Image (cartoon, rainbow, N blue to C red):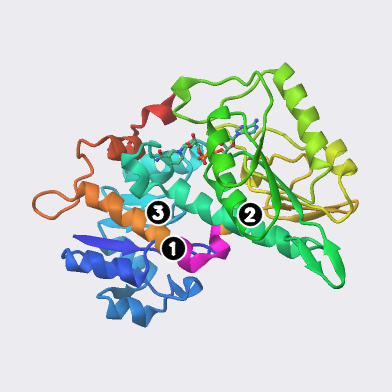
Amino acid sequence: MTIGVLKEGSGENRVALLPEHVANLVKKEFTVLVETGAGAASHAEDHLYREAGAQIKERGDIIKAAEWFLSIDAPEDHLPEGKSLISVFAPLSNKGVVEKLAREGVTSFSLDMIPRSTRAQAVDVLSSMATVAGYKAVLVAAGELPGFFPMFMSASGTIKPSRVLILGAGVAGLQALATARKLGAVVEVFDVRSAVKEEVVSLGGKFVEVEGATDDASAGGYAVEQTDEYRQRQSELIQQHAILSDVVITTAQIPGKKAPILIRKETVDAMKPGSVIVDLAASTGGNCEITRDGERVVHGDVVIIGNSNFASTVPSDASRMLGNNYLNFIGLMIDDTGKLDPGVEDEIIQATLVTRGGEIVNERIKS
Ligand code: NAD
């Protein structure tokens, strides 16, 4: 069976598989074709893929020859009918991509549709990339900040530690908390899900609570939209904490919906000169009213960085984690003859299957 690894478009430094992942597939008797230069931005040169057992080919040849394609973004090329694609293309918000794949008759899987269960952890691309994003957000904020993160006591006087406020304690928020604590900051964390309080405290953060959040057990552990009254109280409390902070990192998302606005323009206006906001929800509208996706905005004396793809800025380890997720996913589909069976009865495979036989087959997307 032939698997083709496609090079990502400009602006994406990661690659779906590194040479170490290729070696694993070759050992299982897959033929692996890798597009010329696919791993270059992740520091995985073509010769390393060759040494791992891959064949280096041009894109068009891979699209013709491979039965399965692996990529991070869904390829824009026309894919021949009957081929299969494993990718991460946010099908809940990318209707055009989903319709294209259905029209082409491609069997497509989007790994961001995985259920957030214990069993699915090994293929959880959302968690692995959120881990990278949470870590990098703190480093970028520390680089922008005109002061130190840790407390310094020296003959030149005592410097107070920075105060970091993190909004959203999912995977990215908790990683940001852990990283900011390691750098010596004092960290406060806010989330609508009070279930995360224990984790926040165990990582050395202070949990900021607003009573009366709407929780929906059927949302699979995700947050849901909140009432206007709650939003008003939340906004006031966040403002009180944000204006005392040096750094605010926002990570709050609601799957398939626009991100909630948690930092209003008035709050930014009232923040300390030199403070920094890093908004990881930028691609879904941002948690800060001033955020612009992919941009660094200076508003008064506050810097707002909107970036939902920090994973691409740590391409080697992000690709390492992603490739492990892809391998684990492929492992679920290998049948007794060593081939990949997209029809396998498995809740993880079924949840991520988006199109098949010319149709959109995923119930979550259809509804
Ligand atoms: P996410 O990226 O969807 O959202 C980030 C955080 O923002 C969440 O904690 C969410 O509660 C919070 N949020 C949303 N609206 C908010 C608001 N108005 N104000 C403040 N905070 C708000 O989250 P995620 O990291 O993908 O995690 C989502 C869920 O999945 C969590 O329950 C997490 O524990 C769970 N999870 C489970 C597994 C597993 O068991 N395998 C793995 C990863 C995540």
Q: Find residue 192 and report its horizontal and vertical position in percent.
A: 61, 29
The nearer-to-camera label among 3 and 2 is 2
**Type of amino acid at the residue the image marks with label 3:** His
Q: Rate crowding at label 1 as few (under 14), some (14 to 19) or many (20 or more) other CA atoms within 10 Å.
A: many
Magenta stretch: residue 242 in it? no
**Type of amino acid at the residue the image marks with label 1:** Ser
Reading the image, the residue beneath label 3 is 78
Reading the image, the residue beneath label 2 is 181
Reading the image, the residue beneath label 1 is 319
The nearer-to-camera label among 1 and 2 is 2
The part of the chain drawn in magenta is 311-318
Is residue 31 something that shows in the picture?
no
Image: 23 above or below 190: below
Q: Find residue 231 and report its horizontal and vertical position in percent.
A: 72, 24
**Type of amino acid at the residue the image marks with label 2:** Arg
- Mark 3 element type: loop
Front residue of 287/256: it is 287
Front residue of 363/134: it is 134
Q: CA distance from mark 1 to mark 2?
A: 26 Å
Q: CA distance from mark 3 to mark 1?
A: 25 Å
Front residue of 166/100: it is 166
